[in-house]
Image (cartoon, grey):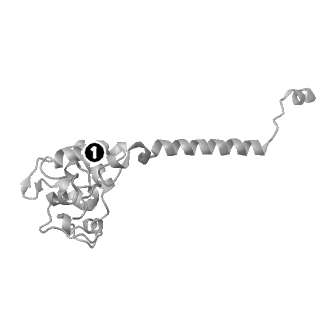
Amino acid sequence: MANFKRRNRPQLKKNPIGTILVILIWSVAMGWLLTFATNAHGAVPPSEIGTVDIVPAAHQLGQKLYLENCSSCHLAIPPSVLPTQTWKNLLQDPQHYGATLKPLIDPPRILVWRYLSTFSRPHKEEERTPYRINKSRFFKALHPQVELQRPVQVGSCVSCHPGATEYNFRKIRSKV
């Protein structure tokens, strides 16, 4: 009876080359699909990006709310211009450069914060928190060898970035 059971079981042939080939093809296919699915550069032409960073879908609503709330009074600047701590303080304080603002409430505040904190830069502990763009080391790093107008104001951006009112800081006016 023991011999009968052994003979009726199908024998699986072990083929390591076939297994490796299947794993290789599977890996290449999955890598290609993941690259295609997450490639933001292929999805949006660079001329249409506008801001300095490509904003993934998870942060686009936060960006939209940021623009709706901030650009209604002044030119909205990219989050990378100021450190994260500055943005955090600005979102929490209703006193905004001499004006009292109606504070954002959750969930819009959380969405705006996620957008700003994702695209801003870290703040050094020993560094003072800048509240003016010309005091920010990030602003200075983004504008090397640029003679800035005095006084530097958020509206001054348009002199070099003609698309700044549409939140497009990629287009730069050529020097005359």
Quadrant housing residue 128: bottom left
User: Which part of the image, by quadrant, shows the N terminus?
Assistant: top right
Q: Position of residue 114 (x, y in %)?
A: 30, 49
Q: Quadrant of residue 140?
A: bottom left
Q: Amino acid at mark 1?
A: Gly
Identify which residue is drawn at 90% across, 29% down.
7
Q: How many numbered badges does the structure rendering display?
A: 1
Q: Percent position (x, y) of residue 34?
A: 51, 44
* 125 shown above or below 28: below
Q: Nearer the viewer, residue 88 or 53?
A: 53
Seen in the picture, residue 23 relative to 90 is either above or below; the reply is above
Residue 44 visible in the shown view:
yes
Mark 1: give few (<14), some (14-19) or many (20+) Cα within 10 Å: many
> Circle 1 — which element?
helix
The percent position of residue 172, horizontal first and vertical second, equals: 26, 58
| Residue 151, image x, y percentages | 11, 67
Horizontal placement of 7 versus 150: left or right?
right
Residue placed at 81% from the left, 35% from the top? 12
Badge 1 is on which residue? 62
State which quadrant residue 176 falls in.
bottom left
- Res 104 visible: no
Q: Is residue 8 above or below residue 160?
A: above
